[in-house]
Amino acid sequence: MDLGIIGQAAGLFAVTNIDDILILALFFSQGAGVPGSARRVVLGQYLGFAAILAVAVAAAFGATFLPASVLPYLGLLPLALGLKAAWQAWKDHRDGGPGPLEVAAVTFANGGDNIGVYVPVFATAGTGGMAVYAVVFLVLVAVWCFAGRFFATRPVVARALARWGHILLPLVLIAVGLLILVEGGAFGL
């Protein structure tokens, strides 16, 4: 096993997923105190990231499931989820935290740029290198989930998220959605 590839994979993961820690902390705080909520967030994160990996690996082998012109429209997912969360916050309705499919959808939509970075790296890494990248990435998803939950449970952060999380989550999701749409040039933006 080449330690250089492991280091490169860890660095690539960290650089392309730094924004996920905030989103994960918000998801974890949304379900604070609800049995099974943390498991649903972790499951959703893994489902979304597995979808990102599957698309990137397939594209590296030449099968393009999502044309590049479609990627910016993935921003509609977090935008819609953010608007839904804003509506629920306005109605003061708390549903016990996010479900795994909601987390997966946000993870996948927010990972459109990851796919664009991973494809050329995977294409040049070969099958063995891709496998190392995938394993390292999947291990680091657990680390990211731990970090998101850690931040969400720090007393100062937990108090702030308990007080403002119902506002921050919709704002962050809407901002992520709009950023993906605008940066990708969706709808001629």
Image (cartoon, rainbow, N blue to C red):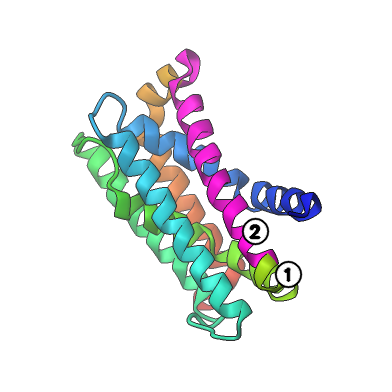
Q: Residues within 10 Å of mark 1 (few under 14, many from 20)?
A: some
Asked if residue 38 lies in the magenta stretch, the reply is no
Please give the residue where the numbered disc 2 appears in the rendered image: 133
Residue 95 position (above or below residue 179): above
Q: Residue at x 70, y 54 (%)?
A: 9
The x, y position of residue 134, in whole percent, is: 58, 59
- Residue 150 in magenta stretch: yes
Residue found at the very far front of the displayed protein: 1
Residue flagged by tag 2: what amino acid is it? Tyr
Say which element carries label 1.
helix
Report the magenta stretch's main SS. helix
Residue at the farthest top position: 155
Q: Determine contact: label 1, label 2, CB under 8 Å.
A: yes
Q: Horizontal and vertical percent for residue 168?
A: 43, 36
Q: Which label number is shown at residue 125?
A: 1
Q: Residue at x 62, y 51 (%)?
A: 136
Judged left or right of residue 36, residue 135 is right
Bounds of the magenta segment: 129-157
Q: SS at mark 2? A: helix
Residue 8 higher or lower than 33, as above or below? below
- Sooner in the amino-acid sequence: mark 1 or mark 2: 1
The spot of residue 34 in percent (x, y) is: 24, 29
